[in-house]
Amino acid sequence: MSSTESYGSPESYGSREPRGAAGAPGPGEAPADASPTGPDTAVTDAAVAQPAATVPPAGGSGADTDRETTRTVSVPGATLFVRSRPPAPPNGDRPAPALFLHGLGGSSQNWSRLMGLLDDVLDSEAVDLPGFGFSPPPDDGDYSINAHARAVVRLLEAEGRGPVHLFGNSMGGAVATRVAAARPELVRTLTLVSPALPEIRPQRSAWPTALASVPGLPRLYMRATRDWSVERRTHALISLCYGDPAAFGEEEMAEAVREYRRRLELPYFWDAMIRSTRGIVNAYTLPGQHSLWRQAGRVLAPTLLVYGGRDKLVSFRMARRAAKAFRDARLLVIPDGGHVAMMEHPRSVARTFRELLTETGA
């Protein structure tokens, strides 16, 4: 393992904890009384420009899509756009099926790099959740975490692919947790990249995203930024999601701008973003057995947790709690990583997932 990351059981995590996990400011995190200068200014701009978007809208970072195929699948209540990465010619047994779930504002393309790195061990599919990417809105307009989870379960049932290696980022991590807890027979392993699990004290850079769920505020955001170019919005969004925005190349940025422009022209774009943001906030407040943390404790599948030390949306401090919450958890820490490690550090995520397969025989 390289010096920029650490991996192991929750018990081994404590000795590798970067500054910030015990309450002191961590990488990319300002002290509570700091002024929003430097990189934090870009974070504020991103939140204003796109109050709910938390994942770059395109594959980025040289995503290899040459071997991908796409199709639409109709399930009760939704039509889903599915991106497939067929397995490389296997040397032995056919690779196991996998399903990838993107975060708020993202799409199936966010997983292209990682799917390409794992095509010798996985038969991968990534889905655009209802209202995102190329999937139209759900028939009933329900964008709650439970509704997204139902759509995922219905997709797995319709295709008969379970049990799958289930991956989720951010909002998709919360959805994947629900699926794994409610339908354990459908999930072989669970990999969560910066999962959107409830935080009692979110870091300041995540506040604007949560505030986008408040009625009336999104309209104020849009009015205040109506003259912003798509290029400015996209650059701000990348700054919010990446630990090192410079890692997002020029060609990938151009692709992201084109895709962002396409989405902004969709009549349901803002509705899907705002309602899904509210769905996340509502899921954070559910008590008792419906709590995401309580459901995390019911997950039976071996679980890999991935956290970035420079994540501006999901606090790195939550890594310790998550590692304790899941019954069979392993933790990958990328100190200089942001919110989308599968895009920014796909090789680290792929290598650690392979270690999970070897260790568990899943």
Image (cartoon, grey):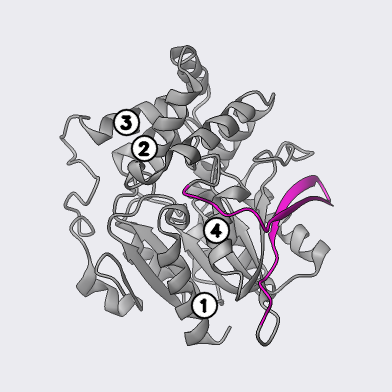
User: Could you tell whether 91 is left or right of 1 in the image?
Assistant: right
Say which residue label 1 marks.
302
Q: Do the residues labelled 2 and 4 touch (CB within 8 Å)?
A: no
> Which of the 4 image quarters holds residue 157?
bottom right
Q: How far apart are marks 1 and 3 (CA)?
A: 37 Å
Q: Which amino acid does label 3 sit on?
A: Ala
Magenta residue span = 61-90
Q: How far apart are marks 1 and 4 (CA)?
A: 14 Å
| Dot 4 or dot 3, earlier in sequence | 3
Q: Distance between the residues labelled 2 and 1?
A: 32 Å
Q: Nearer the viewer, residue 293 or 130?
A: 130
Say which residue label 4 marks.
168
User: Could you tell whether 78 is left or right of 215 in the image?
Assistant: right
User: Could you tell whether 296 is left or right of 99 in the image?
Assistant: left
| Dot 2 or dot 1, earlier in sequence | 2
User: Could you tell whether 219 is left or right of 348 in the image?
Assistant: right
Res 42 seen here: yes
Q: What residue type is labelled 4?
A: Gly
Residue 197 magenta-highlighted: no
Q: Which amino acid does label 1 sit on?
A: Pro
| Dot 2 or dot 3, earlier in sequence | 3
Establish if 12 lies above or below 344: below
Q: Nearer the viewer, mark 1 or mark 3?
A: 3
Residue 70 magenta-highlighted: yes
Establish if 273 lies above or below 249: above
State the SS at label 3.
helix
Q: Are marks 2 and 3 in contact (CB under 8 Å)?
A: yes
Say which residue label 2 marks.
239
Q: Residue at x 40, y 50 (%)?
A: 339
Establish if 328 lies above or below 41: below
Q: Which of marks 2 and 1 is in front?
A: 2
